[in-house]
Image: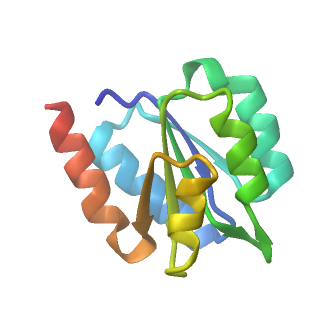
Amino acid sequence: MKVGKVLLVEDYPMLQAGITDALKFFFGESTVVLVAGTVAEAEKLFAEHSTDTDLILMDTCLSGTVTFDLTRKISLVFDGMIVATSSVEDYLPKMKAYGCTHACYKADLHAFLKDLANQAN
């Protein structure tokens, strides 16, 4: 899978930086990573970049707000890969039911991205 632009929906700054670094490591330094820390930011960035975004990494909970509705809204118009990321086991199957194509524990995200990048080669 070629990944040129990613929408990263994540509210923790340390994870935002770490995931961005991992994306650039696995998919190349030219990978554009759009970071949204709130539902409103995610909606705005998705509206502006939905046609040229290749991958969405969707945290399941942003500052106490579960992203089920946002996921459903995006999945209705986005035909690319939407990956639910969570530390809460119960959220992952729910996120898939709301439209995520894949689900991954945050602790396993590095390996998931590595595997995804290897599929592209």
Q: Quadrant of the N terminus?
A: top left
Q: Is residue 68 above or below residue 41?
A: below
Q: Is residue 96 above or below residue 41?
A: below
Q: What is the number of callouts on the image?
A: 0
Q: Residue at x 47, y 53 (%)?
A: 20
Q: Residue at x 31, y 63 (%)?
A: 110
Q: Residue furthest right?
A: 40
Could you tell me residue 97's position as x and y percent? 58, 55
Instruction: Using the rendered view, name the quadrant where residue 47 is placed.
Output: top right
Tell me, what colour scheme is on the image? rainbow
Q: Is residue 6 above or below residue 50?
A: below
Could you tell me residue 24's position as x and y percent? 37, 44
Could you tell me residue 59's position as x and y percent? 60, 63
Q: Residue at x 65, y 25 (%)?
A: 50
Q: Residue furthest front?
A: 97
Could you tell me residue 11's position as x and y percent? 69, 66
